[in-house]
Image: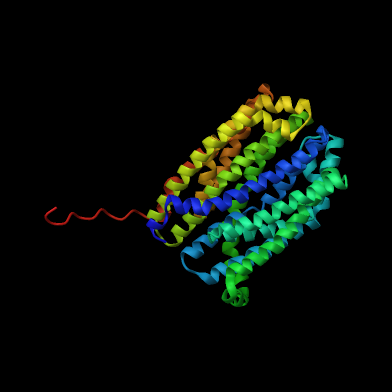
Amino acid sequence: MTASAITRRSIAAQAWPIMIGQITVPLVGLVDTAVIGRTGDAVALAAVALGSFVVTFLFWTFGFLRMGMTGLTAQAEGAKDGKEVRALLIRGIALGVGLGAALLALQAVIVPLAFRIFAGSGELDAVAEGFVAARLFGAPAALAGFAINGWLLGLGRTRAALLLQIVMNTANIALDLIFVWHFGWGARGVGFGTSSAEWIALATGLTIAAFVLGRDGRAAIRGELARAFDPAALKRLFGVNADIMVRTVALLILFGWFANAGARLGPVQLGANHVLSQFVGLAAYVLDGFAFTAESRVGQAIGAKSRDDFLRAIRLTGEFSFASGLVFVAAIAFGGRFLVELMTSNPQVQERALALAPFAALQPLIGAPAWLLDGVFIGATQGKALRNAAILSTALYIATDLAMRPWGPLGVWIALTLSYVYRAGALALWWPGLLKQVGTPPPLAEPSPGT
């Protein structure tokens, strides 16, 4: 890849399939919330909100299967190491299935423990536990799907990743509607709809990966089995991803603290926070289209040892991120009432959500630097920087939330908004070290005689 290959047109071409695919992810959350929210049952809505966070915490503890896979695959692709690209696919899928099976087997211990941590009530916890148990049925498929998605993004195969997302999320929405509205399974039906869709997505992902590899790649992959499970390769994989895992857990604790803050204020506030979080999540997922593009471009630039490509990729993805953030600020600010009323018919939840909607509107712009820098550091496989920045920003957020407790719901959202500032600022501390990894810029050319 040459510096000239990284243009606004090429960034947009790589990012748009990710953005469309990412839009469908929070749209599933929006549908899940609307399916329950339109029943007018605040407890059921709060149960889906709390249960969704518990599942997110459990699954995204292993988010390195997506993030680490993208960075490692991009660097292997940049270095033209096809054998390692194939070995990474095998390694990631096997690890995802194994970890997901462990979660499924240990659910009798994990689920009760999770609900001892988060504040709720007897009725709320009972409904939420049913939702979580249904979701864990799909754990092996979900975690293996993380690995396949990360592998495709690392290769820059964003259209293939888009197809995988569309299949997953279309199946999810359809099954949710069938299980909840037709069979009347409530929150548990939402969980079974999502977990069933995850198995459909895994089968689709394996088919897509086989297509991407091609006939020669499929034939060669049999020879990569020994390489995939080589102890040295596995040690490197865990070494790179252990820090990313700690980083993910730290950020999950941050959002867990936010969810728990809403739960402590009652089901109505928890439901309102969940509704607003869907809007913020939609913006974050769309802007992640540029962050994921940065992961791939930065990883390939490092693999190719090109400082020019590295800096240009960051600058161009940054331009798109800030522009998109402004668009979402306007969309949430002007369409907030319509969206809240669409999401829930409960008047108390509507009132609470509308009062806090301005904070939800600001977050796409304030969060853009943090989301983009995450992509840059993931693509560079700078696990230690990601880990340390996440721990620091989470600690600062918790301190801010505690200080803002007297402000009630307003303080909860002020603290969350500031958390994005902390994340971007913390990653900026490790920026000089990242530049050193890429290398020093070439010396200025000596002027030729006569100039």
Q: Nearer the viewer, residue 102 or 275?
A: 275
Residue 97 x, y percent position in the rendering: 71, 62
Residue 209 as seen in the image, left or right of residue 174: left
Residue 28 x, y percent position in the rendering: 71, 46
Q: Nearer the viewer, residue 388 or 171?
A: 171
In the image, residue 203 sits, relative to residue 411, either above or below, namely below
The residue furthest top is 406
> Residue 361 lies in what quarter of the image?
top right
Count of numbered tags:
0
Q: Nearer the viewer, residue 283 or 258?
A: 283
Q: Would you say residue 265 is visible in this rendering?
A: no
Q: Would you say residue 184 is visible in this rendering?
A: yes
Residue 64 x, y percent position in the rendering: 61, 54
Q: In the rendered image, which quarter contains the N terminus?
A: bottom left
The colour scheme applied to this rendered structure is rainbow
Residue 248 x, y percent position in the rendering: 62, 48
Q: Residue at x 69, y 62 (%)?
A: 204
Q: Residue at x 59, y 66 (%)?
A: 88
> Residue 409 lies in what quarter of the image?
top right
Q: Nearer the viewer, residue 418 or 351?
A: 351
Q: Residue at x 75, y 59 (%)?
A: 199
